[in-house]
Structure formats: structure tokens, C-alpha cells
Amino acid sequence: MNSRDIAEKKDLWNELNDLWIQRQMRRRKGRLSLLAALSVVVVAGVVLYAASFTAPQQSLFMQIKGQQLDKGAMERSSSELGNFRTHDAVEDTETITI
């Protein structure tokens, strides 16, 4: 009779151990899912925050010079190295050394 009780207790402990392991795995999966969702929200927020700053800014050269070039294609003038041609306007460029 004693050996039978011991065997039943071992079976019960094994089942409880399996249930405990399953519960811990569910908790870990829940935590990881929550962490993944939070990470996605943070990354999306950072991307949107960064995108809000990059759109209206001009290059540093344009801010220093105080001018804005047309969005058209720029071609290098073959006659002079310092001139750029944008559509019909010719702009003279200068090199700034710091």
C-alpha cells in the first residue's frame, strides 16, 4: 500500500510540475509579446519623430548662403567649373572652408 501511495504522489508531483512549467511558459510568452508590441510602438514613434524634422530642413550650405535652388536637374557648365546651370538661371558657387 505504501509503494502505491508513493507512486501516486510522484505522478501528482509530475503533473503539477508540468502544469507549473506550462504556466511559466505562458507568462514568458505574454511578457515577450507585450515587450515586442511596446518596441514596435516606440520604433514607430521614433521614425515619425525623425521624419517630422527631415522634411522641412535644407542643406547647411543653403542655410548659410540664404538661397534655395530649384528642384530641377543641375548640369555642370563646361565653360567654367564654378558655375551651375538650373533651367535658364546660372548660379555662381563658392567654396566655404572652416
Image (cartoon, rainbow, N blue to C red):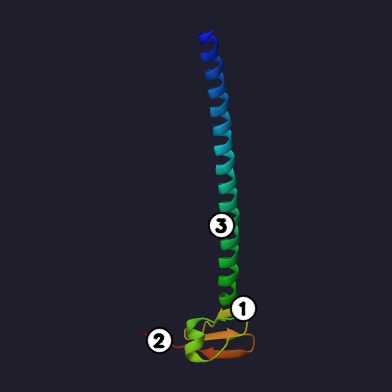
C-alpha distance separating marks 3 and 2: 43 Å
Q: Is residue 71 above or below residue 12?
A: below
Q: Position of residue 64 (x, y in %)?
A: 47, 89
- The residue carrying mark 1 is 73
Contact, mark 2 vs mark 1 (Cβ under 8 Å): no
Of 21 and 56, which appears nearest the observer? 21
- The residue carrying mark 3 is 39
Q: Is residue 37 above or below residue 46?
A: above
Horizontal arrangement in the rendering, residue 48 relative to residue 3 (left or right): right
**What count of labels does the image hold?**
3
Crowding around mark 1 (Cα neighbors within 10 Å: few <14, some 14 to 19, many 20+) is few
Amino acid type assigned to the residue bearing label 1 in the image: Ala
Crowding around mark 2 (Cα neighbors within 10 Å: few <14, some 14 to 19, many 20+) is few
Q: Secondary structure at mark 3?
A: helix
Residue at the extreme top of the image, as rendered: 1
Amino acid type assigned to the residue bearing label 3 in the image: Ser
Instruction: Name the mark nearer the viewer: 3 or 2.
Output: 3
- The residue carrying mark 2 is 96
Q: Quadrant of the C terminus?
A: bottom left
At 57% from the left and 71% from the top, the residue drawn is 49
Horizontal arrangement in the rendering, residue 94 relative to residue 32 (left or right): left
At 51% from the left and 14% from the top, the residue drawn is 6
Amino acid type assigned to the residue bearing label 2 in the image: Ile
Ranked by sequence position, the earlier of labels 3 and 1 is 3
Ranked by sequence position, the earlier of labels 2 and 1 is 1
Instruction: Name the mark nearer the viewer: 2 or 1.
Output: 2
Of 32 and 83, which appears nearest the observer? 32
